[in-house]
Structures are given as C-alpha cells and as structure tokens.
Image (cartoon, helix red, strand yellow):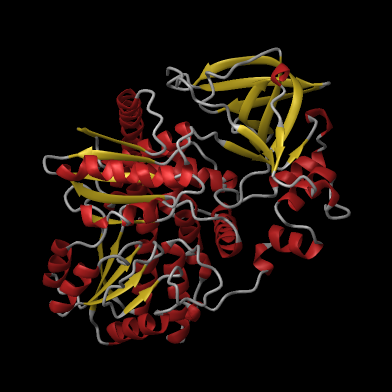
Amino acid sequence: MTALVGLPKPRWRLRDPYAHQNGIANFPPIVATVLAARGITTRAQADLFYKPHLAPDYDPLELPGMHEAITRVRQAIEGNETIALYGDFDVDGVTSVAVLYEGLKPLGADCINYIPDRFAEGYGLNLGAVKKLREMGADLLVTADCGISSVIEVAYANQLGLDVIILDHHTVPDELPAAVAAVNPKRPDSPYPFDELAAVGVAYRFLDVLYEAMHRAFDHSAFVDLAALGTVVDVAPLFDENRRIVTEGLAQMQKGLRWGLDALAKVSGTAPERFSAETLGFAIGPRMNAAGRLAHANIALDLMLARDPLTARNLAEQLDHLNRQRQAQTEEAFALAEEKLGTSDDPLIMVWAEGLSPGIVGLVASRLAERRNRPAIVLSKGPEESRASARSVPGFDIVSAIRKEKHLLERHGGHRAAAGFTVRNEHLETLRDRLVNTASEQLGWEPARRLIEVDAEARLAGLTGTEVKGLMRFEPCGQGNRKPVLLARGVQLKDAKPVGSAQDHLRLMVKDGPITWRGIAFRQAEAELDGQVDIVFSLQRDWRGDGVELEVLDIAPAFEQRPLESS
C-alpha cells in the first residue's frame, strides 16, 4: 500500500493532566491514574466499574411505548395470532431476531422470522416485505434494529390490517411512524436513564418485562450472550448498562457456548475461555456480518438458532468462506476508492463507483474515515440509484448532515457515527457539494489530524504484574470504554517487520531496560522508525499464549519528541 501524500501525523493528547493527583488510594499507581483519567476517582466508582453487576437495574417500562408493546404482544400470543419478526441484516438485527424468536416461542407464540435481502430489498422495512408477510398470515409485525424511520411502510401495513411494533435504537426522525408502539431509548420523550442500548439490548429488555407480565420466570443466561454479541459488534458504547450486558454475556460464553458460537469459535481458532469483546468484534462479528454483505443474513440467523453441532459447523464454514471473500473484495474496493480520491483534501469524502458491492461500502467508508480522519461516504452506483454507507469522525454528526438533504434522497437513516441512504444518480454531484459544505462549516477546510488520547505516561520497564493485571481488567473494552492508552518514550526498537496479507501491519519487538515486549502495530507498515522510538500503546492478550503483548497505536522516532498536549 502506498503512503497517502500529506497525511498529517496523529496528535497525542493527555486525557487528564491532573489524573495522577486524583488517583484512588491503595490502587497501583498507573491503574489509579488511568481510572482517574476516565473520571473514576472514588472506591465506590471503581467498584461499579470493575463489578458492573452492582449497578442499579433500570426499569424497562420507562422506555416509551414499552407498555403498549407488551400489551399487544400478549394479545397476539393469547389469541394465537402470527407474529412476524423483522430484523436488519447486520449482527445487531440478526441477534435481535434470534433473541425475540427464542424468547417468544416458549410463551406459545407463532413466529415468522424475516430478514430482508440487502441486494434485492435494501435496508429497513420495505413495502414488498410488508405485503408478503401479510399474505403469509402475519397479524403483528415486530421490527428490530429498523423501523423508526419507516413512516410510509408502517402506514401501508396498517392499511393491510397488520399492526406494527418497533424495537429500534437509531436516531429518531421528526415524524414517528403510526405504529402500535415505537420503543426506542433515543426518543426525546424517554425518561429511561440510558439511551445507548443496541437494538438487541432493547429486545432483551422487552423480553424481560414480557415474561414478568405473563408471570413466567425469565432466564437471562439464555439470551445475554446474544445481547452481548449484538451490542459489541454494533459498536454500542461499552459503559453503563451496556457494560453490564457485555460483562455478563462474556461470562456466560466462557461457561459454555451455544452451538452456533461454538462452531464460529472453532473456525476462527478461538478458545471459548478466551472470548472477549475484542473476540466478538474482530473474529465472530465479521464472519456473521459476511452473510448479509455477500449472500443472505439468514445464514447467520440460522447459525444462532442451530440446535445441533453438525448444522452449526456447516453454517459456520459457509460464513468463514464468505468472510475471506469479503476481505478480498474490501481490499480491492478500498484501493479503487483511494485511487479515485487521490490527494483530495475535502473535509468530507464522498466517492462512488459501479461494481462496488453494497455489502462492503460501509467497510470501505470506515477504512477511509480512519485513514484520512474525515467523514467518508462510499456508494455502490447502480443504473439509476446508488446505495451509500457513511462513517463519521468525532465532532461530526453524519446522520444530521444527511438528513438536511433528505429532499434529494429516496431513503435514509442511521446514527451520529454511521448512516446509510439511497440516492438517484442525477443528484450525486449536488449531494456531494452540499455535504462537503456542511462538513466545511463544522470541521473547517484544514486537513484534520487524528487525535490519540493518552491516559498516562509509563516506563515499560516499570510496569508491574499487578499493574498489568489491573489495566487488563478494564475489559470489556470498545466504543465508549477504550483500552487504557499509555505513552512510553525512548524504548529500543529491536525488530520490526511487515506482516499480514497486504504486508501493512508491523510485528515489533521493543526493549526498555531489561524488559522485552512483543507488539503489533496495525496498518503502520509505513511508519518512520529509528533505533529509539516513542510508542503509544495498549495492552492485549497475546493470541499465541496466555501472555500479554503491546498493541501499538502510534510510533515515532524518539528524536522527533512529539509533544504530549494537555486537554
């Protein structure tokens, strides 16, 4: 991969310059500093962080629409009505449908599972599917991970005599669909204390109160693994209620995996006892998402619902094969997008091409946004319309920017950080100009510099086993709870060699005093190196064994003395 001309070096900024003064007594110094940098400065706060099960349990009936949803589903079950469960084709949608199906069946519900085809139907609820499900005998339609923007489709369902319940978590539009209930923690009228649940989290809490309403015991352990999986892979923030869901889900997985997850663990070479949020995000999630990206998400859904190891193994092998195809297509599409963009310095990237699979444009947009540190939109251009996936950077609400131009769009939806839309080709140039102008107003025209927030400076040689253990206990880590980030200056670079299929990663060996550490620097094969380097890093489990290695987030020659800014 060639270097991107003019790509500015990342900035390093100390998250809290005074964190070392506010650490919790009796905690190892580096651990106390990192906790304080995250706003955790008392023993009680630390206990809740390390033991999220101690946090108070929120009442899901505070979610607007939950009472109406429970009442209507009970009516459907007791009246032997057919319930259609309609989910998105990503992991959050698939796990939401799986949770609902496995939760409703023991209550006596007659369910039909339906996930749209990405290529033939596109994202979200669509008129054809509504008509088809009604013809199949559905009396009630429950959407999961979609529906909150489907005003026209819900109105059509109502015309057909099909009631609709929406379980969603996407940004709420100005006009809500005329559904029986629209349960969404992001509704402006929601008193629920936490608004960052993934859709599967909404489905999980829905089942909890449904079981209570029907005087049945709810076995959280039967569903929390799926809730954790969907939460992590959808990149929901891992704090507050989500941290508890993921912590409990991982604990359940380490006790034993459902057949589908066990099969995925085997094809990905991951031992169940080593499952972590990182495992879900980088080994399990991409394989499951490959189904909806290149084939049909029903493969992933069938895998989660598999009842025997042979069926699960066959489905997992299909997903593993699709994932390898997805990786190859993504690399080709990313290279094409980079070629088309050249040295463009627009504050927002928008690129399109014929032949790009709609299933991988989101991955390409994510890579572009990460590499160029600006919002990125990639479109698969069809004969008349183009389908887009957008990814943003901190400080820019991509879905609001897109929604401003809704008069140019056929459909749209998403989050602050990720969104999608469909646009007629004759509007592409106008749409790009408008979105670039919006980005320039908010971000300016100067090329952005990626910011890496550092929790503390540390000597590699000075890290004790107790400190390493304390830092590793920040898991589960992900969006909203990044791994602890440390800066070590003046370490000796003993070895560095490119690795990976594209030779774009660096496998490192660094030494500080008598201590030698292994490390990996993803997508940094072009980094400027020297005998002595400064590294910004996190700790991660070494997949070769039970040890710990460095995940190097950035590396610079020590003579450069890149400053550590204060926030």
* Camera sees residue 149: yes
Horizontal and vertical percent for residue 115?
26, 58
Q: What is the total number of numbered labels drawn onto the structure image?
A: 0
The residue lying at 46 percent from left, 49 percent from top is 396
Residue lying at the far right of the rendered structure: 26
Position of 60 with respect to 475 (left or right) is: left
Please tell me in which quadrant of the rendered image residue 563 appears. top right
Position of 459 with respect to 553 (left or right) is: right
* Camera sees residue 90: no
**Nearest the camera: 441 or 379?**
441
Rendered-image quadrant of the N terminus: top left
User: Compared to 514, does 211 lie above or below?
Assistant: below
**Nearest the camera: 226 or 202?**
202
Position of 450 with respect to 171 (left or right) is: right
**Nearest the camera: 557 or 60?**
557
Please tell me in which quadrant of the rendered image residue 53 appears. bottom right
Rendered-image quadrant of the C terminus: top right
Please tell me in which quadrant of the rendered image residue 244 appears. bottom right
Horizontal and vertical percent for residue 221?
52, 66
Horizontal and vertical percent for residue 93?
35, 58
**Nearest the camera: 359 or 437?**
437
The residue lying at 67 percent from left, 25 percent from top is 518
Horizontal and vertical percent for residue 342?
35, 23
